[in-house]
Amino acid sequence: MGHDHDETTGHDEAGHSHGEHEHGEHEHDSDHGQSHAEHTHDGHHAHDAEGVEIGVLTVSTSRTLDDDPAGDIIAAACEDAGHEIAERRLVADEMDAIEDAVAALLDDGVDVVLTTGGTGLTPDDVTVDAIEPLFDRPVPGFGELFRWLSYEEVGPMAMASRATAGVVDDRLVFCLPGSENAARTGAEKLVAPAVGHLLGLVRR
């Protein structure tokens, strides 16, 4: 998947047995301890955002919107999951242009921005550098899971991807690589199935 160039359990050390812990002693974080009542019959969570509107931004100097296979893959994955592609844009790999394009999509009211391209290690891969300063909070799990999935496909070369995500106000921005395989991995396996739940958490 040429990312972007574009590219247990263990025993308690103190030897405590499970019997030494009382059941009421631990509390779960809000994103793990949901009751059954918070889950719908189809596996969705009660707080999931519905009707998610997504803007797709392709970062490239060589593509056009009519010749944008990675963007097409991302859009199709999101639509197949029931989300709406509200807008698609293309921008050159220049930091100011990328930042302005993301801001414009957010100003247009999309819930989520997905960028593709410019997440590698070459000097002209500047998408992450342009967008990370916009984040109010990072979503590190996205990049971690993406590189783990990529490792299963391309081995240690997965380190070359800087795919990332973060929260901007009450919206989400995901930065995916520009290669078709990498865009498919990120969109189909991570973003499309989870973005409604993540957005619901951000807006709680």
Image (spheres, rainbow, N blue to C red):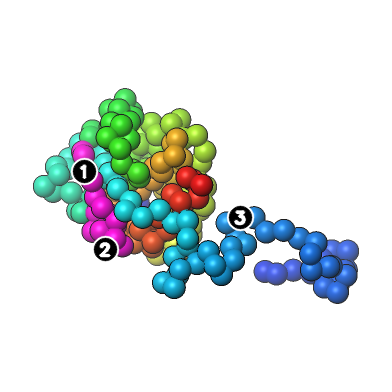
Residue 90 vertical position relative to residue 201 in the rendered view, above or below: above
Q: Amino acid at mark 1?
A: Arg
Tell me the element at label 2. helix
Query: From this viewpoint, is residue 155 visible?
Result: no
Q: Secondary structure at mark 1?
A: strand
Q: Earlier in the sequence, mark 3 or mark 2?
A: 3
Would you say 7 lies left or right of 204 here? Answer: left
Which mark is on residue 80?
2
Residue drawn at point x = 50 percent, y = 67 percent:
39
Q: Residue at x 21, y 38 (%)?
A: 90
User: Residue 102 versus residue 126: which sits nearer the camera?
Assistant: 102
Label 3, label 1: how far apart the Cα atoms are = 34 Å
**Residue 28, percent across and down?**
67, 59
Question: Considering depth in this image, is 128 or 33 the residue closer to the camera?
Answer: 33
Which residues, given as a range, are shown in magenta?
A: 73-90
**Residue at 26%, 63% in the rendered image:** 80
Residue 44, given in percent of the width and then of the height, sits at 44, 65
In the rendered structure, are the residues bearing label 3 and label 1 in contact, judged by CB atoms less than 8 Å apart?
no
Residue 30: give its label: 3
Q: Nearer the viewer, mark 3 or mark 1?
A: 3
Residue 163 horizontal/vertical position (percent): 41, 47
Which numbered circle lies on residue 88?
Answer: 1
Amino acid bearing label 3 = Ser
How crowded pointer 1 is (Cα within 10 Å; few <14, some 14-19, many 20+) is rated as some
Q: Secondary structure at mark 3?
A: loop
How far apart, in angstroms, are the residues tagged by discs 1 and 2?
17 Å
